[in-house]
Amino acid sequence: MVTKTKGIGDLFKEIIDKGLCTVCGACVGDCPYVVFYRGKIRMLDFCNRTEGHCYEYCPRTFTDLDAISNKIHGTSYTGDEIGTVKEVLMARAGDSKTRAKAQYGGTVSALLSLALDNGVIDAAILSKNTDDKLPSGFVARSSAQVLEGAGSNYMAYPALEALNGMPRDSKDRLGIVVTPCQAIALAKMKVSPPSQRVSMENVRLSIGLFCTWALAYDRFFEFIKNNVSPAKIKKFDIPPPPANRFDFYIGKEVESFPLDEIRNYRMSTCAYCLDMTAEFTDISVGSVEGIEGWNTVIVRTQQGMDIVEEAKKKGVLEIKELPAQNLVHLKDAALIKKARAVQAIVERTGDKNDLMYLGISDNLKGKLLSHRVTAQGGH
Amino acid sequence: MPNIDMDAPGSNQLFIGNEAMARGALEAGIGFASAYPGTPSSEILGSLSEVAKKRDIYVEWSVNEKVAIEAGAAASFAGVRALVAMKMNGLNTVIDFLSTITLSGIGKKGIVVMVGDDPSAHSSSNETDSRPVSKWLDIPLVEPGDFQEAKDMMPFLYGISEEFGTISIMRSVTRIAHARGNIKLGEIPKIAHKARFEQYLDPAAPMPTPIMCVPSSFRHMFQHMRMDKVREKFESCSFNRYVGPDKPDLLIITAGSGWLYSQDAVNALKAENRIGILKLGTLWPLPEKLIKTHLSKADKVIFIEETDPFLEGVIMEYTAGFSPESKRNLFYGKHTRHLNSFGELTPDAVIKAITSVLDIKYAPRDAEYMKKVEAVPQGHVMDRLLTFCPGCPHRASFWAIKNALAMDGRNGFVTGDIGCYTMALGPAGFFQTRTHQCMGAGAGLANGFGQLSRFGFNQPVVSVVGDSTFYHSIIPALVNGVHNHSNFTLVILDNGATAMTGFQPHPGTELTAMGEPAAQISMENICRAIGARVEICDPFDLKDTTRTILDLVEQDQGARVAIMRRTCELVRQKKEKKPYKMQIDPDKCLGEDCGCNRLCTRVFRCPGLIWDAAAGKTRIDEVICTACGVCADICPEGAITKEAIA
């Protein structure tokens, strides 16, 4: 376990070159030395510093989950399956057009549009695909732009690069859509705010996306090129279990591949992630097992509560109770991810006292190490 | 620069060695001169080109040395005296032609190859000694020992060339070529050159008589006979002379700059009555009898010569064949480690060798002298990096190449070539260049690397060449690459000049060496005709250039070309004013903080940017900044700004 903040050389040596990078983008966009290119973090020059934000904010360098939890939720890290929760519910966008563009229920797009319209935020950072189907972070300033970012392609992308790219003196209040690893990096930035970047105080709303793993762009894009025409893909989808499929929507046709085949293109680092539901955000959103066109929504903070209440009042969101059985399944899946991560870490380090980046209590560690995990699953 | 064709016979003038040689060629009545530039030979043709029109001679910067010597030979074949100049690297590329013209012989008029060697490789990729070429190819070779000889040897050598019908070589070294000395001028003859290629030796002969190297063995024998006659002639040549006592304790045998250093050494040691110096000017074939005479007068002999032990080897070889009654000498030199067979000679090295052989104590200065010398400029002289000029397009080109290869991430690398951009081996080009050989070798190497994928090789290869180099020796490599589907990217840094050697014209530029409009050869048309994909970009547009290189590199198939077109800054600033007003906003400059850490002065390192350590900010050096504006695009904080000057 290493707590020291180091420099860019160490970041590459310890994390990126070892296949542990999540491509969250926390190290990109802030300085001229590190760039994101075609799914990879690249170093253009050696910056020669022994300490840097790039190393400090990386979600795979030492991460004190208590410190993060205290900053975001005002409590120490409990290790509960789906993190700190105010309310769990089921929602979808009131507007059918938003739903049509969205991956599932359109809840994320609807909430961001509302926040922009209400003036809660001035800009939203989310992702959209380039021509090569490479997702990258971008800044949306209107509902129409928000819809450009709707939908997922399941590939790791550097959302935080767009945040780091905001002008240092920007007064824009920001909303941001993040995956769990990005949420952790963002939380680390909030715990120890950077001096030379846009103020973390500007980040007013973070919406997390459920995630079991993400695909590595470079390898997955090779697969796409060899099997499907990239330019013609309209949408990517992993239907909820037990489908076990990965679907490419090409025009009105759907081309399906076994999910097990696609799993080969996972980011290797995802095996060491213990967060399925993006616990360090204001609101987390995912699909609902067995109920098409709706989202599972976990409200975690007062800011999250406020915007969801407002959405409900204005009809921006249709809200229902999440069936009890779904919540049980969700928690089971989230716990399995936690247990698998800690077990994979110990397997990698070969030492129960060396959890790589993970700063958790011994109690939680013991619990997760002894939890029996079933065959591979997820998504 | 002095006027090398001044009409003042008998007057003394201060010329650099190269100008003296050019003057000598004029006094020899040449009508034709061709060369490819290369230090330390470039000023010969450069100074001749200035007077070419007035003197009614033809002067040409040729595409490469091989074409230059063949063109010069044609003039000789047609009855016009020709001079061909090159550096030793060039001589290496013309060996094949030399090996046939020694057999075929020349035309009615002489041809002299002037080759400039560069001991210590001050401005070269190597320090090859050209003299051995004369031995293995049977070519007369002379070497001037001072500036007067640099001039006087030229008419003499044309005489040899014509009397014996053989091409001849004059070798000089950097310290003769580039140092300045007094010479007494001779007369420049007025010659109305008449060129005609006589195809029949005798108008009545039934068959034409080609100039040819067959039957080779017969002609080889004939050349040896010619060389024996040349040797006889050299025995009494005044360029070989002896100074010193009749029976010296030590005989120095020397040539070229070694002659100057030997005189200095004997003088410094006040050993004029102990040491004799046999100074040789005709180095091949050697005047054996003269040498034997002097060897018989001394027991100890030391050889003082630049680079290789050429005289040392040949003369020791001769003595092995001397009769048993001959005097047996003790020989000193490079084989006894009294002198190095690498690096330049210096008067100090010569003194050290002599004092060691004669066991003389000599301390020219106290032991601390060098330390004191080094201390004097401390604080008064800025540390200077071996780097590109401020505003040089190459810095921007290599910045883009560096970033493109880093983004590609497959450990790509640059195979280098010969030009200013050779400095990309170091910080000037961000250490991008990973191979450095001779002209054209970078593209040749890229051809080979580009065929290794079958053995698991997957690194992108970028061959970086200059525009003059492209015409000189890259075209065949590109033909080979396209034809054989080799996988590499050729980057041509087209700055419109042969910049490193002094802005000589090349086939892509507007004017000939005579100052007349040239037919400009389009490099992109050549590359496209060969069948390569060609992209042209402005290196000052870093974004576009980086994207273009990445796109070419990622193509990962076939030989493809990027032309980075931007005029050499030293050429541009002679014609145009500064394009921008450059400023740095100290409030925005991050300095050494995280997020920058002096990218501009630590990595980019244009000499126009200064790190103000006290303020912790970067400043612009108003004196040398050329306002190219590139650093404004590199600054991550937008602290450096460029404002167009109307």
Image (spheres, rainbow, N blue to C red):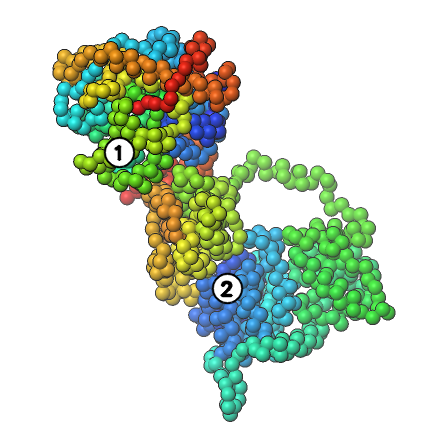
Residue B400 in the image: above or below residue B531: above
Q: Which mark is residue B157?
A: none
Distance (Cα) linking label 2 and label 1:
65 Å
Residue at (52% x, 76% y) in the render: B76
- A137 or B304: which is nearer to us? A137
Residue at (82% x, 50% y) in the render: B359
- A105 or A194: which is nearer to us? A105
Q: In the rendered view of the protein, which quadrant contains the C terminus of chain B?
A: top left
Does any portion of residue B366 appear in the rendered image? yes
Left or right: B144 in relation to B321 = left
Q: Which residue is mark 1?
A: A256
Q: Which mark is residue B65?
A: 2
Residue B338 in the image, given as x and y percentages of width and height: 74, 52
Q: Which amino acid type corresponds to the residue marked 1 in the rendered image?
A: Ser
Residue B375 in the image: above or below residue B171: above
- A159 or B284: which is nearer to us? A159
Residue at (37% x, 36% y) in the render: A219
Left or right: B524 in relation to B504 = left
Q: Which amino acid type corresponds to the residue marked 2 in the rendered image?
A: Glu
Residue A364 in the image, given as x and y percentages of width and height: 42, 10
Check the image and name the residue furthest to the bottom: B204
Left or right: B24 in relation to B351 = left
Residue at (46% x, 68% y) in the render: B59
Chain holding disc 2: B
